[in-house]
Image: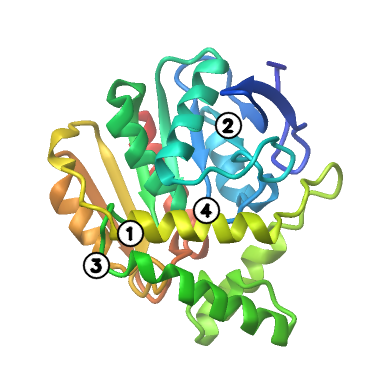
């Protein structure tokens, strides 16, 4: 891997590594040495869907790495058929980079994948941050499909990114936060990632629905430190799931941000950054 310590998320180059028969596109930068932080992103996200404020703040303290799931952006292959498949790819990707232990920040679907990684290879993850997410079989998770299509349609009619509706409350505070977040996602001007195809959306939503209807996982067996964060009005992965996970993980801490939705960590990014760095470095 290249030394990317002096980059920002707007300038860090995209690299590639082969694992599980897939050529994964990824971006890695930040402070060299120590345990890296792997960022697992949301439904239909490519490399350009990471909040540069969060990425740059983590990179000032640790190396942070994000990759395109198979069949997404510039990663090769066909989109994984299940959350477990995506977790196996994540494990293979991490090992292909030469790491035997990492910290993970899993947002939304990335949080589902993180939990499956814990089940498959629990010693791989030292600490986990689970944001805007929930447990397998959790309340309302299988309903993400309908909500997503509804807000994609609303976005088409209003010429807005669906995340404006899916990630944020629709009061004045939420709308301002949504505009600021979506503006930050456009800061990278060169070498942007390929757009995500509709076929990927369909397969990922199917995988989420199956996972949401599946048998709950026994989270009490995982003793690693877990920081759980969400908005108090998450309509994609309902906020009660965050409270549920906090009770079931034996070594967890919970932060619920007021007057915010699924993207609470983006609306309160300054506060989240401080809490995340403290959690990851102590």
Q: Give the CA separation, mark 4 to mark 1.
A: 15 Å
Image spot of residue 200 (x, y percent) = 62, 54
Mark sitting earlier along the chain (2/3): 2
Q: Quadrant of residue 57?
A: top right
Tell me the SS state at disc 1.
helix
Residue appearing at x 55%, y 47% in the figure: 54
Q: Give the CA separation, mark 2 to mark 4.
A: 15 Å
Tell me the SS state at disc 3.
helix
Q: Closer to the camera: disc 2 or disc 4? A: 4
Image spot of residue 201 (x, y percent) = 60, 59
**In front: 34, or 166?**
166
Q: Closer to the camera: disc 4 or disc 1? A: 1
Q: Disc 2 vs disc 3: Cβ atoms closer than 8 Å?
A: no
Q: Closer to the camera: disc 1 or disc 2? A: 1
Residue appearing at x 26%, y 60% in the figure: 138
- The residue beneath circle 4 is 42
Q: Give the CA separation, mark 1 to mark 3.
A: 14 Å
Circle 3: is it few (<14), some (14-19), or many (20+) Cα within 10 Å?
some
Judged left or right of residue 206, residue 279 is left
Circle 4: is it few (<14), some (14-19), or many (20+) Cα within 10 Å?
many
Tell me the SS state at disc 4.
loop
**In front: 281, or 233?**
233
- The residue beneath circle 3 is 240
Mark sitting earlier along the chain (1/3): 1
Circle 1: is it few (<14), some (14-19), or many (20+) Cα within 10 Å?
many
């Amino acid at each position: 891997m290249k030394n990317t310590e002096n980059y920002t998320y707007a300038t860090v180059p995209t690299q590639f590594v082969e694992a599980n028969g897939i050529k994964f596109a990824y971006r890695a930068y930040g402070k060299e040495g120590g345990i890296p932080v792997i960022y697992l992103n949301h439904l239909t996200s490519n490399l350009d869907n990471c909040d540069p404020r969060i990425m740059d703040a983590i990179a000032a303290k640790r190396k942070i790495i994000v990759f395109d799931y198979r069949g997404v952006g510039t990663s090769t292959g066909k989109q994984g058929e299940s959350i477990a498949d995506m977790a196996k790819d994540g494990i293979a990707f991490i090992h292909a980079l030469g790491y035997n232990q990492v910290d993970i920040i899993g947002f939304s679907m990335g949080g589902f994948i993180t939990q499956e990684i814990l089940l498959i290879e629990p010693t791989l993850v030292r600490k986990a941050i689970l944001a805007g997410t929930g447990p397998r079989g959790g309340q309302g998770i299988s309903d993400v499909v309908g909500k997503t299509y509804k807000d994609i349609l609303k976005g088409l009619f209003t010429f807005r990114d669906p995340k404006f509706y899916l990630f944020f409350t629709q009061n004045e505070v939420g709308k301002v936060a949504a505009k600021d977040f979506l503006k930050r996602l456009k800061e990278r001007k060169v070498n942007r990632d390929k757009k995500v195809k509709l076929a990927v959306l369909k397969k990922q939503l199917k995988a989420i629905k199956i996972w949401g209807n599946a048998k709950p996982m026994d989270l009490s067996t995982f003793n690693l430190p877990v920081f759980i964060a969400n908005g108090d009005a998450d309509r994609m992965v309902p906020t009660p799931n965050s409270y549920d996970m906090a009770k079931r993980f034996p070594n967890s801490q919970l932060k619920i941000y007021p007057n915010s939705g699924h993207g609470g960590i983006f609306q309160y990014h300054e506060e989240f950054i401080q809490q995340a760095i403290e959690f990851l470095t102590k």
